[in-house]
Every structure is written in structure tokens, then in C-alpha cells.
Amino acid sequence: MNLRPLIPATWQMSLAAVDLKVVETLLETEPFQPELTSILRVLSTDPKQVKVVILGQDPYPGLGVPTGLAFDVGKQPLLPASLRNIFTEYCQDLGLHKPDNGDLAPWARQGVFLLNTALTCQPGHPGSQSRPWLPFTSAIVAELVRQGALFVVWGNHARAVACAAQATICVSSSHPSPLSARRGSAPFIGSRPFSAVNQALATAGREEVNWRLS
């Protein structure tokens, strides 16, 4: 398996030095999701166009659920628990109605980079393929730091990756998972991440994100 041709031209140079052999061997020997053509979907956004990175951990483990964008499930109306909490905060923060499906692609088209630090997992087994991906996704994070992107970090794992890259963090809270969304010194519920991002973008003289979904 050769993943290199799936990397868009806008990312080829910044990721050229990353050795993908371990990941490619993994995908040849283990079941994985999302499907091959969606694994690098997040890279369809030019790094120079990225405004903010929302950093996740790894794809949803449910069979056929992940799409290649962190927290996204496409047009499916049945939402994973973490995304339900994200939408709860979306409604409270922005005063908008709850979206009727889990399609976050409108955010991605505006430069919201929905990145998991692992781009695959075995169906039904969260975190099962995390470690081999970290050199590759760390290189992605490093490039986005160089481009001046803001970072939203939800949970200790995302915070550790962002801090290691010396990212500019504009929102930091617990993870939206039901196990942690209301816990810790900075709980996700009540953190108002969407308005905080737009305030930071406005302060930097950059175009704000229209967070409204269908």
C-alpha cells in the first residue's frame, strides 16, 4: 500500500520527510476505517487556508461511522455521544438550533481543520491504531503551527499534542465525551468554544467562521 499519492499537492512538501511505512504496513495487515479514500480527507484543505484546528484523538469506532474528519459523521441523523455534546454547546454558545445531522463539512470548507491524531482505527476498537499515526499527524500539526492556525484542544490528549508543537491555543477544555464533558477545572460544557474562536480571529484581523449548520 502506498499512501503518498493520496496526499494533496498542497501538503506534499511539508509531509515529504515523514516515513509512512509503518502506517502502510499496518493498513495492509489489519482491518481499518474509514475507507482508504477517506483516510486523508482532512488534508483537502490547503494549510494556508486553515484558520483553526479542532484536535481529536482517533476516529469513531462504530462500524462505518468515521468519515475522515474528526467528530464528523456526515449526513447521518444518529449522532455519537461526543457530537451530541458538541451540538449542545453549539446551541448554548451561539443561540442556534440543533443541526439535524452530523455533517461538519461546512466548517471544513471555511478553514476549520477537523484533525484526529490517529487517522484510522479498527472497527469497534477505539485507540487501536493510534501510535503508528502520531509522527504523521504531528507533522501536520507542526505545519499548521507554522501557518499561524489557532488551536481548539478538547481533553488531555489533544492538549499534550498541541503543547508539544507549541501551538497557539485559543480554547482548552475537557473532552466532549459524556465521561468528561462536565468535569475538571475547565469543563467542555459552558466553555463557549465557537464564540471564543471567532473573538480570537476578529482580534487577529481574520475572517470569522460562520458556524451555522443545517
Image (cartoon, grey):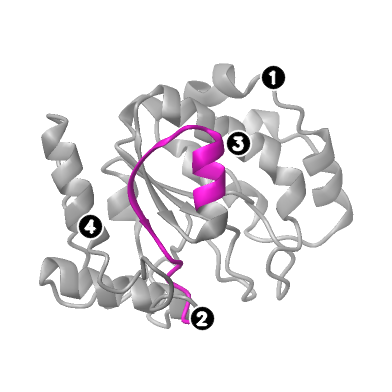
Q: Is mark 3 on a helix, strand or loop?
A: helix
Provide the residue designation for mark 2. 179
Query: Mark 2 Cα within 10 Å, few/some/many (few <14, many 20+)?
Result: few
Provide the residue designation for mark 1. 17
Q: Where is residue 16 in the image (x, y as percent from the top left)?
A: 65, 19
Q: How far apart are marks 2 and 1 (CA)?
A: 37 Å
Check the image and report above or below for 85 versus 93.
below
Q: Is mark 2 on a helix, strand or loop?
A: loop
Magenta region: 159-179
Q: How far apart are marks 1 and 4 (CA)?
A: 34 Å
- In the image, farthest residue toward the top: 13
In this view, the residue in front, 9 or 198, is 198
Residue kind at label 3, given as amino acid type = Ser
Residue at the image point whose x is 36% and y is 77% from the top: 85
Provide the residue designation for mark 3. 138
Check the image and report above or below for 155 versus 164.
below
Residue at the image point whose x is 18% and y is 38% from the top: 201
Label 1 or label 3, whichever lies nearer to me, is: 3
